Amino acid sequence: MMTFSTDAWARNAARYETIRTMPFNEALAAGTLGRGPFEHYIVQDAHYLIGFGRALAIAAAKAPDPDRMVQFCEAAKEAVVVERALHGSFFADWGISPDDFAATPVSPPCHHYVSYLIATAYAEPYEVVLGAILPCFWIYAEIGRDIYGRASKDNPYHAWIDTYAGEEFHEAVRRMREATDEAAATASPRTIEAMHAAYTKATQLEWMFWNGAHTEAAWPL
Amino acid sequence: MMTFSTDAWARNAARYETIRTMPFNEALAAGTLGRGPFEHYIVQDAHYLIGFGRALAIAAAKAPDPDRMVQFCEAAKEAVVVERALHGSFFADWGISPDDFAATPVSPPCHHYVSYLIATAYAEPYEVVLGAILPCFWIYAEIGRDIYGRASKDNPYHAWIDTYAGEEFHEAVRRMREATDEAAATASPRTIEAMHAAYTKATQLEWMFWNGAHTEAAWPL
Amino acid sequence: MMTFSTDAWARNAARYETIRTMPFNEALAAGTLGRGPFEHYIVQDAHYLIGFGRALAIAAAKAPDPDRMVQFCEAAKEAVVVERALHGSFFADWGISPDDFAATPVSPPCHHYVSYLIATAYAEPYEVVLGAILPCFWIYAEIGRDIYGRASKDNPYHAWIDTYAGEEFHEAVRRMREATDEAAATASPRTIEAMHAAYTKATQLEWMFWNGAHTEAAWPL
Amino acid sequence: MMTFSTDAWARNAARYETIRTMPFNEALAAGTLGRGPFEHYIVQDAHYLIGFGRALAIAAAKAPDPDRMVQFCEAAKEAVVVERALHGSFFADWGISPDDFAATPVSPPCHHYVSYLIATAYAEPYEVVLGAILPCFWIYAEIGRDIYGRASKDNPYHAWIDTYAGEEFHEAVRRMREATDEAAATASPRTIEAMHAAYTKATQLEWMFWNGAHTEAAWPL
């Protein structure tokens, strides 16, 4: 029988391809991405990671057994650790001061994505929470690997792109797929459909997040 | 001392004026709104009301005393009752079948707003939940009163516009302001700032909801 | 196929019989219950109803469709309305002043039961929440019917016992069973076992609540 | 100004002394504790730690800043790690097999305490969650230090008692007090009273947990 994650990937293959080839990612790989969109991206990513960490902490609280609790606690902590690394190195490299960061509001797509993850984390059963969390791990890892594979070394963003290639992150993705498939294995068809709906929604919000960086999305009022 | 709600209204006066005069509301008042945007609006409104009802039910669960629990239970129920009324009359009048409705996904701005309300309802303390819930009651009522006041009787949407003018709804708004001000009265400065941030965020999402109807917003992938 | 509720009743038949014949209920039916335990009971019942109402409000927020949302909002409101009726008539009849009530802490068994319902309401999926909520409706109704059937008219608690016999309450129980069986009908075996565990736990806590009244349970430190 | 934790300790000084000198702890220190109560204790402790870890994970999700998120994620993980250590060494030493453990239900006092922590973690604001979580850290550490100080080396439970004396645990307690005092520093008087009520309730439940081990508490039906 097909695992949930294999099925989810197949159902969203066209969406993945749309994300892979969207202007932001093409420009990032080509090294032609403007500094404005890149800065927007890393600032919103820092905001996002905190919200993502909160959703992972709730997943830890809802996990059915101690091993999964530990896995999600570590993933939640790691999201915050990566957020700090952004502040500690990339923000400095690109001249984004702590004051700049504090003065930059969460953008609409970032706010939308984080709101969705937190709403889902609290309101939905564990299985569906995992359906919503998986795309951020998995799509991000695949997009990163794709960009890493085609970006040249003189790409101005190569330091950033290198972070995508970490083996540790790919291991975390593998374990997240495993947790999601394990949860789906004993779920009802109704719950599995809700997992798929969550997976697709988060996939759409991945695109909107990157697109928001590209358009430097801001609140219209 | 200024109540929270008076302060919140003043802080967001420019945003209210932007909403009041935004193209969707101008066209609705003038009777020139296209059928597409109107249908989009009432379909998304039906989706919204269910999510709003869920957030109100959580507010009921978090309310500090029995009277407020009853108030929020009634408000949650009323949101669903209004949603049913949309299905029962407006959908029929405008030729939107149950199948049409079922086939229309929640639009991005509606999904964003509902996600935010539900995330806030679960994750935040009661006072902040009320800060997020109040704009939907209050801005909606004021916009409705404004449009009702200037729409002519041959406006094709007059049946809809009339629903804004119900005295019962304005009474519900008054009680929601009262609950919010009561909660703010003994809150810390930090919590009151979080209430203001929530009020402003929901105000921005009100605009995005109406603008989404005007542009018939859909998921790009 | 056996419905969930029929199965749950059968699995807990011995526990029900233990509750039905426990000293508190025997003494209530016989009219020999001391005034202390009775007063303890109605005071703790008032505390309990507020917590029960909160759990029902969360169930409303998690309900899968608008009709169930309305049902649970109404049930949550009704719990508070009954709590008020206790204050308004029984407390007066038995000389329990508002100050007496305010000065009486939630007893350990009442605190335990309410904590369990609220923890379950937030942490568990809708189906399991219903498994935990059903015994309070159903066992209470059956115990009430049993005591009503055997209590004489000169029972000093007959006014209280009469409240058990309300047709409205039995209709609410019927609808709660229906909602629970509906939820179980499409749930996975794993979720159904979690529903049964919740049903049994709440049944045990029903006994502990009544027993706590009989022993006038208080915090030992 | 007195910190919250100093005030909370003073308000509950008599309760602490009651716990310190309760039969279970006296017998543990004297080495006269029966094997039944000790086994009951470590089995229920293992159950407790998982629930405690879940409450800490929710606290992480609600924490106001990244540093506290990391602190609570680590504490949640540590609770599970300690639970595993129980399984890995003490259970083996005392002949409690995995099957014995699986067959032993959560006892009423353990279920009560865990239900309270999880209900509070979800339903209450961050400050109050910390008020409920602190006693388990702090009282446990102080009781442990006290027993460690007076237990002789030929105490049959000395391996267990030694675990109390770990410097790491006392450091975690210190940081938890710091987080709680930090949260209280900007909280409203109403919230601080709710924090105190939560602290006292958890203190009472600490006693009930130990007392449950001493009486080998079980579900009466």
Image (cartoon, coloured by chain):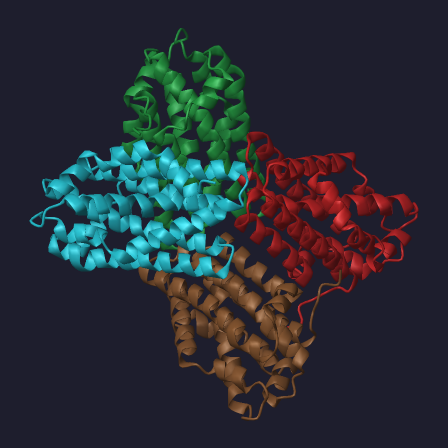
Chain colours: A cyan, B green, C red, D brown
In the depicted view, which residue is nearer to us: A76 or A168?
A168
Question: x, y (%) of residue B14?
Answer: 27, 33
All told, the count of numbered labels is: 0
In the depicted view, which residue is nearer to us: C195 or D217?
C195
**On the picture, is A187 further left or further right than B113?**
right
Could you say which quadrant of the image residue D110 lies in?
Answer: bottom right
Q: Is residue C13 visible?
A: yes
Question: x, y (%) of residue B89?
Answer: 52, 15
**On the picture, is C88 further left or further right than A71?**
right
Q: Quadrant of the C terminus of chain D?
A: bottom right
Question: x, y (%) of residue C79?
Answer: 66, 43
Q: Is residue D105 visible?
A: no
Looking at this rendering, what residue extends furthest in the front direction?
Answer: A1
Looking at this rendering, what residue extends furthest in the left direction?
Answer: A154
Q: Relative to residue A203, is residue B128 depicted above or below?
A: below
In the depicted view, which residue is nearer to us: B8 or A9?
A9
Name the residue located 34 percent from the left edge and 55 percent from the top edge. Answer: A172
Q: Relative to residue B105, is residue D76 depicted above or below?
A: below
Name the residue located 69 percent from the left edge and 70 percent from the top edge. Answer: D217
Question: x, y (%) of residue D87?
Answer: 53, 71
Q: Quadrant of the N terminus of chain D?
A: bottom left
Name the residue located 53 percent from the left edge and 51 percent from the top edge. Answer: C123
